[in-house]
Image (spheres, helix red, strand yellow):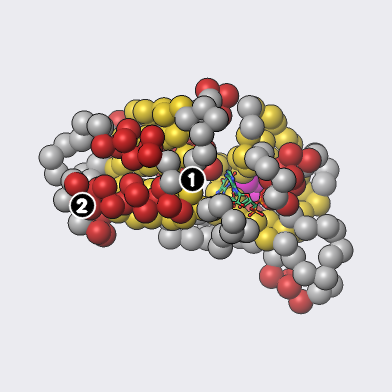
Amino acid sequence: MRLWEMLFVKATVAEVQRAGRFRRVRLQAEALRNAEWRPGQQVRIDVGAPGALAPLLRTYSVWDRDGDTIELQGLVHGDGPGARWMGEAEAGQAVLISKPKGDFVTRPAGYHLFVGEETASVAFGAMLRGLPEAERAASRAVVEIAGPEDKLALGGDVTWVERGGESAAASEGLVDAVRTLALPDEPGQAYVAGEARTVQAVKQHLIRDRGWPRKAVLTKPFWTPGKRGME
Ligand SMILES: Cc1cc2nc3c(=O)[nH]c(=O)nc-3n(C[C@H](O)[C@H](O)[C@H](O)COP(=O)(O)OP(=O)(O)OC[C@H]3O[C@@H](n4cnc5c(N)ncnc54)[C@H](O)[C@@H]3O)c2cc1C
């Protein structure tokens, strides 16, 4: 066994379900049973060829967790190794993954605002489910998708913004949708994730135009054009 392999958990693909461009992939490993997971956290998975000299890591949010099994929702787009792995995953396949980690998790707040595109909506679904009922009911989400087939069952109050064939990078549609959103006068806590430039634009809007304090806007860039495997 190579040294880096000892840092990972050996998991088995238990099931793969297709829904639009998403692949809902269930990964099972005894070592996951006692692993800590907070909704919004992510795992890194080795999407490289089995037996390769070094891992090829891509990051995916944990959509749900049940005992020794975690569920991911991988978007199939382009021909990067992560998207390819998601598109080709089959039950019975072995894969190395890290345990869940990360600080993109909900914080105590009067209300919560989630903003991002398809890939970010995976984390949002888990975070919304993890909130107490009353907080979930008071939450708002604005999610940009290519089309209706990319809608995940998020629960809560979601404004879906369809961009059609436009790029999700530096998306003005998402910022505009947040701009026209009716929100309470007081700032809440925002979670903004997805394409890096869009994330920055939404953050700027909340801070500059709405006067939200910086610490009330938690951001997490997931990807950006020309960059491979962010984080
Ligand atoms: C904390 C975190 C959590 C994440 N959670 C999820 C998740 O739950 N589900 C999920 O599907 N993704 C998630 N992502 C995003 C995912 O890791 C990236 O999309 C990753 O780049 C995919 O790897 P790849 O090998 O397919 O493409 P890469 O080799 O990394 O990139 C190749 C090209 O594809 C472009 N690209 C990458 N992602 C996208 C995209 N979504 N749409 C259009 N073009 C893209 C890149 O800009 C680059 O030009 C998460 C990322 C982070 C950092």
Residue in view at x 25 percent, y 32 percent? 181
- Residue 62 drawn above or below residue 230: above
Q: Is residue 67 magenta?
A: yes
Residue 228: image quadrant is bottom right
> What's the magenta region?
66-70
The residue that disc 1 covers is 169
Quadrant into which the N terminus falls: bottom right
Query: Where's residue 131, x and y in %?
Result: 36, 41
Query: Where's residue 116, x and y in %?
Result: 43, 42
Residue in view at x 31 percent, y 35 percent? 176
**Residue type (three-letter) at the residue carrying disc 2:** Arg
**Residue type (three-letter) at the residue carrying disc 1:** Ala
Mark 1 CB near ligand 1 (8 Å cut): yes
- Residue 48 drawn above or below residue 157: below
Quadrant into which the C terminus falls: bottom right
Query: Where's residue 37, x and y in %?
Result: 52, 54
